[in-house]
Image: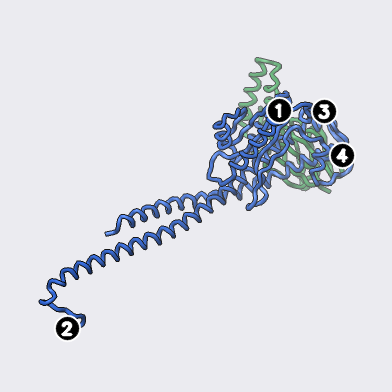
Chain colours: A green, B blue
């Protein structure tokens, strides 16, 4: 048994496919895995990755910087205005962003924007499979 | 040879022909752009629909929060008017009608005794309002014929900040709805405050399916969702306006091309007539001259028609 996964950005549907399981992380709720037959669910996604595990094996991973997940019946939609698949991530840029954010943080520990930048850069690098 | 009149007409035909080439090219460009813009508007639909469907489910789950974007001001002191126009003209009535509708909103605000705040997108509206000494509080150009979500987000954030700070109490969005290739209509919509979640939900048509679980909480989801909803609405309006702009331009340029063709036909006819007139005059002159000469030599060389053959 599988369900339909859609990754919807404001400009287009960026990913569509079948999945056996989808793993995401919600704000305040920690990691959550959905399998077909999950109760209807709406959650706010944390700056983290979303893993789509395909029925025939293999997985697609996306860096999702904010958004929502809606599970209804056999359909799961991930709404996000900033999501990237591993192939789309510019590793060099993420490294630079990470270094910038780290230096900003070391200058001012309470810099929230830099902390958010760092979190985003980290998850980009993790999804792309590159070392920070 | 050619008379002065013929030369003048030939030059005019040449210039009309050049104009026609330009308008034809613009028509073709607009035609391809309108298709692309339409496609983008279509591709953006799922996101907006899904966001609305989440709000529906939230409303069904009974989430109602005191979000700043839902704040209904007791007294409206300042009305924000967002107007979406284009940067370039030659688009028929596209700009003037949207600008007129925006101006009406400003006048409405004034007649209610409220101040206004113009948030202008596109050079054309800026030129119009600046020339008439309206105060323009925010201006963006270079995005209207191919808007990105990033643009929509920036403007929506700016407007939402003005609203939540209490600097404006109501926001109207004036843009052009794209109904079909042949029909676009200026629309004025209440942008902020958002209606209650129930009335947003009533607009959508997706069936609500059972009780949802929410994480972190219905209120938490709604809080994160409403700003996205505002952005998606503005983005949708930008995309529809862009498609409308190109459709209007295509129509205007088609009319211009047709008119140029008609003008060329009319001028060619006039020119041909002028040339014919000139030729007739010339022949008359030659014949007249020959006759004048011939009448002198009449006796010496009589040449009756066909006499020698």
Marker count (numbered): 4
Q: Chain of mark 4?
A: B
As measured in the structure, the alpha-carbon distance from the residue carrying label 1 to the one carrying label 2 is 103 Å
As measured in the structure, the alpha-carbon distance from the residue carrying label 4 to the one carrying label 1 is 38 Å
Which residue is under mark 2?
B308
Q: Chain of mark 1?
A: B
Residue at left 61%, top 50%?
B35
Residue at the outermost right position? B211
- Image quadrant holding the C terminus of chain B, namely bottom left
Element marked by disc 3 = loop
As measured in the structure, the alpha-carbon distance from the residue carrying label 2 to the one carrying label 4 is 112 Å
* Other-residue count near label 2 (Cα within 10 Å), few / some / many at <14 / 14–19 / ≥20: few
Element marked by disc 1 = loop
Which residue is under mark 4?
B60
Q: Chain of mark 3?
A: B
Picture layout, residue A126 above or below residue A58? above
- Mark 3 or mark 2: name the one nearer the start of the chain: 3
Element marked by disc 2 = loop
């Amino acid at each position: 048994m599988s369900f339909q996964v859609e990754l919807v950005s404001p400009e287009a549907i960026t990913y569509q496919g079948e999945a056996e399981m989808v793993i995401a992380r919600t704000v305040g709720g920690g990691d959550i895995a959905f399998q077909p037959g999950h109760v209807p669910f709406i959650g706010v996604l944390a700056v983290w990755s979303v893993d789509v595990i395909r029925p025939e094996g293999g997985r697609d991973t996306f860096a999702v910087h904010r958004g929502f997940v809606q599970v209804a019946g056999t359909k799961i939609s991930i709404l996000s205005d900033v999501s990237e698949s591993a192939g789309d991530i510019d590793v060099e840029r993420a490294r630079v962003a990470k270094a910038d954010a780290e230096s900003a943080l070391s200058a001012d520990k309470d810099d929230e924007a830099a902390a958010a930048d760092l979190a985003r850069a980290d998850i980009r690098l993790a999804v792309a499979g590159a070392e920070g | 040879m050619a008379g002065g009149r013929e030369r003048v007409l030939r030059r005019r035909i040449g210039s009309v022909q050049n104009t026609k080439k330009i308008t034809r090219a613009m028509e073709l460009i607009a035609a391809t752009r309108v298709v692309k813009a339409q496609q983008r508007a279509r591709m953006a639909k799922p996101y907006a629909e899904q966001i609305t469907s989440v709000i529906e489910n939230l409303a069904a789950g009974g989430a109602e929060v005191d979000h700043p974007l839902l704040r209904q001001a007791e007294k409206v002191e300042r009305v924000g008017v967002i107007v979406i126009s284009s940067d370039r003209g030659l688009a028929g009535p596209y700009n003037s009608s949207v600008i007129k509708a925006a101006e009406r909103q400003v006048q409405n605000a004034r007649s209610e005794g409220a101040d206004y705040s113009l948030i202008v997108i596109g050079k054309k509206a800026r030129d119009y309002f600046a020339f008439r000494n309206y105060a323009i509080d925010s201006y963006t150009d270079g995005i209207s014929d191919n808007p990105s979500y990033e643009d929509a987000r920036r403007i929506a954030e700016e407007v939402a900040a003005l609203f939540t700070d209490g600097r404006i109490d109501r926001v109207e969005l004036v843009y052009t709805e794209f109904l079909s290739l042949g029909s676009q209509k200026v629309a004025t919509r209440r942008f902020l405050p958002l209606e209650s979640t129930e009335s947003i939900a009533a607009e959508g048509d997706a069936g609500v399916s059972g009780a949802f679980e929410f994480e972190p909480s219905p209120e938490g989801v709604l809080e994160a969702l409403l700003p996205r909803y505002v952005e998606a609405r503005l983005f949708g309006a930008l995309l529809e306006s862009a498609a409308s702009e190109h459709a209007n331009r295509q129509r205007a340029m088609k009319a211009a091309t047709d008119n140029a063709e008609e003008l060329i036909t009319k001028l060619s006819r006039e020119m041909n007539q002028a040339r014919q007139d000139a030729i007739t005059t010339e022949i008359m002159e030659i014949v007249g001259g020959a006759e004048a000469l011939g009448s002198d030599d009449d006796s010496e060389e009589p040449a009756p028609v066909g006499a020698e053959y």
